[in-house]
Amino acid sequence: MSSDCLFCKIVAGSIPAKRVYEDELCICFADLRPQAPTHLLVVPRQHIASLADAEPAQSSLLGHLFVKAAEIARASDLDHGYRVVLNTGADGGQTVDHLHLHLLGGRPMTWPPG
Ligand code: 5GP
Ligand code: ZN
């Protein structure tokens, strides 16, 4: 846990969030400023600042996040598809320095992203 990290505080429960899933490795909660009808964040309990900081020992944890995102998408009835986004670093648009997957769905997405 990083004491000044927003998502570590949400994981710990000291900042509230609308949780939709949790297990021993990750939690999933609603984004505060949704960009689609479904906009969830899948967050490891362990503090990893960004994908750029990920290490080989964290490979199975990272795989777990993606598999859970797919399960949560199924449970959220995103049968027409969805987008998983992992913003990384300043140019990647990352604003919270605790690695997280965005799960966006419920509308068609455009490409390329902004
Ligand atoms: P990033 O820009 O780092 O890829 O994504 C951070 C996301 O966290 C943004 O979509 C933002 O709306 C969301 N967010 C920021 N602060 C909070 C918060 O306090 N609670 C929740 N649930 N989401 C937050
Ligand atoms: Zn953190």
Image: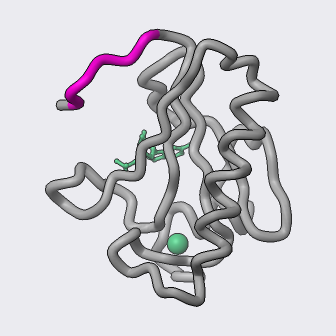
> Magenta segment range?
108-113
Q: Is 18 above or below relative to 68?
A: above
Residue 34 percent across, percent down from the top left = 48, 26
Q: Is residue 79 left or right of residue 97?
A: right
Q: Residue at 66% x, 72% y: name it.
A: 61
Image quadrant in which you'd find residue 105:
top right
Q: Nearer the viewer, residue 107 or 6?
A: 107
| Picture mark count | 0
Is the N terminus in the top left, top right, bottom left or bottom right quadrant?
bottom right
Q: In this view, does 89 lie to the left or right of 67?
A: left
Q: Is 57 above or below relative to 32?
A: below
Q: Residue at 47% x, 19% y: name it.
A: 36
Residue 7 percent across, percent down from the top left = 55, 62
Q: Is residue 9 left or right of residue 77?
A: left
Is the C terminus in the top left, top right, bottom left or bottom right quadrant?
top left
Residue 91 percent across, percent down from the top left = 15, 55
Asked if residue 72 lies in the magenta stretch, the reply is no
Residue 108 percent across, percent down from the top left = 43, 11
Q: Residue at 63% x, 64% y: name it.
A: 63
Q: Is 35 above or below relative to 4?
A: above
Asked if residue 110 lies in the magenta stretch, the reply is yes
Q: Nearer the viewer, residue 43 or 105?
A: 105
Q: Residue at 49% x, 10% y: name it.
A: 107
Give the dominant element type of the magenta stretch: helix, strand or loop: loop
